[in-house]
Image (cartoon, grey):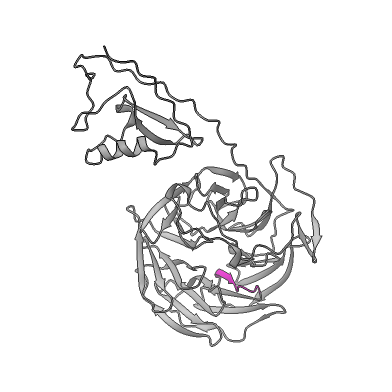
Amino acid sequence: MASERSPPEPLSADHNHDSPRTSSWRRRNSLTARPRDYDQLPDREITEDADGLERHVTQSHDRRLTSSGSRSSYDRYGSKSPLRRPPRSPLTPQKPKKMLKFEPLGLPLDMHLRGVSAVKFSPDGTMFASCSADQTLMLWKLHPHPHHIHTFEGHLAGLSCLTWSPDSRMIATGSDDKCIRLWSTSPPKPHPNPLIGHHNYVYSIAFSPKGNMLASGSFDEAVFLWDVRSGRVMRSLPAHSDPVGGIDFSRDGTLVVSCAGDGLIRVWDTLTGQCLKTLVHEDRKGVTSVQFVPNSRYVLAWTLDSCIRLWDYAAGRCVKTYQGHENARYSLTGAVGRDRDDPKGAFVVSGSEDGSVVAWDVSSKEVLWRGEGAHEGPVMGVDVWSKEGERSWMVTCGLDKKVRVWREVGEDGKDEPMAEVNGLLSRGMELDGVAEDQVKVEPSVEEDTIMETVEEFQG
């Protein structure tokens, strides 16, 4: 008679993958193909963690494997007995659902005469700028309330893109007149000489982290790297076979990423001009915008199949896909913001062609907030200014000729009292953030916990 055996202890959600029992089971079955559908394995115990994800599959004490690794329905004395599934362990309580909510601050800013193509916060978070098809660049002050400062004129055609210098003292714009112009913000005045070199519309532009270089993408399918001081092209990259829709520098300025309507995302070495990596999704839809995430380990890409994809460019694979907005026609852009309540958390926000703004949790891909009716028509640009421990600011623009400023609010829809610090308005914290050299950079990030350690945002 078989000896009685005590039932196995249920596995907890924090069960270690490297436990002796799991490791030995893996060693015995390392050469055996296993079905991927766990429902076909009634002799295995599956436990779920707090997120409801199946994490651990272990062999039950009541079942035995044959030498070939297949399941045997006979007990060790050769008598056939029915198989019984061990009891499932109780699920641990679900984690509280993350909350994110923005409320518009005042009325829309409607000084532009035509559709607004791009809007960006200054790195120090005190100003923002907007550019439009009406050939103007407008400078706005954020505090104590959003208000217009200055209107720059000088381009001979509509503006498509803008970027701020790291010190917030200069703005660069790209236009359909094939030129790039530089504008000083303090005091507001134009740089006398435009940057001329592209043979078609300038559609994307980005400053390097040190502010000494400028990268531009154009309808002429090329990427130019400019020396800002001399105004000359340092390097011309024959990047794509379609108009270049987006461009961005990595955090240390050693890499440039570009995208185009040909469906390709390419990563370049700024020193040599060599293409280090080419990323392409199997659908090969046109990519309209691309940017590095704050820690520069991944790139976000907006595509014309209503998807935003997070790419591990070093491994050459797409690791996350965010869906829930509409994007099949226009070149929409977005941004990455910091989770105020979770220093390790972050969110992705983007405009939509249905007039809404959508925000996703970076790790779980869950839609955290949807701003219905943000604009009357496609929301072309969205930017976020975030700081650790502080609620985020957001600014949006659309083809309805309007710019809107948003503030993150609490779960009850109310914001915290504002306190003035050093002449600026802050919400219960000092304006000086964590220094860059104090941020701990993890050596690697697991696929399921991408961006768990979001590094300090510039500004």
Question: Is the residue 263 above or below the residue 11 in the image?
Answer: below
In which quadrant will I find the C terminus? Answer: bottom right
Report the predominant secondary structure element of the magenta stretch. Answer: strand
| Residue 341 x, y percent position in the rendering | 65, 47
Of 184 and 234, nearer the camera is 234
Q: Residue furthest top?
A: 1
| Residue 402 placement, left or right of 215 | right
| Image: magenta residue range | 159-168
Rendering quarter of residue 312: bottom left
| Residue 117 x, y percent position in the rendering | 56, 63
| Residue 140 x, y percent position in the rendering | 70, 66
Q: Is residue 165 magenta?
A: yes
Residue 17: in sight, yes or no?
yes
In which quadrant will I find the N terminus? Answer: top left
Q: Residue at x 35, y 64 (%)?
A: 278
| Residue 70 x, y percent position in the rendering | 21, 30
| Residue 53 placement, left or right of 43 | right
| Residue 267 placement, left or right of 215 | left
Question: Is the residue 75 above or below the residue 136 in the image?
Answer: above
Q: Residue at x 68, y 64 (%)?
A: 125
Q: Is residue 242 magenta?
A: no
| Residue 188 placement, left or right of 309 | right
Question: In this figure, what is the number of numbered marks?
Answer: 0
Residue 154: in sight, yes or no?
no
Of 384 and 285, nearer the camera is 384
Of 231 and 199, nearer the camera is 231
Of 168 and 379, nearer the camera is 168
Rendering quarter of residue 400: bottom right
Q: Residue furthest bottom?
A: 230
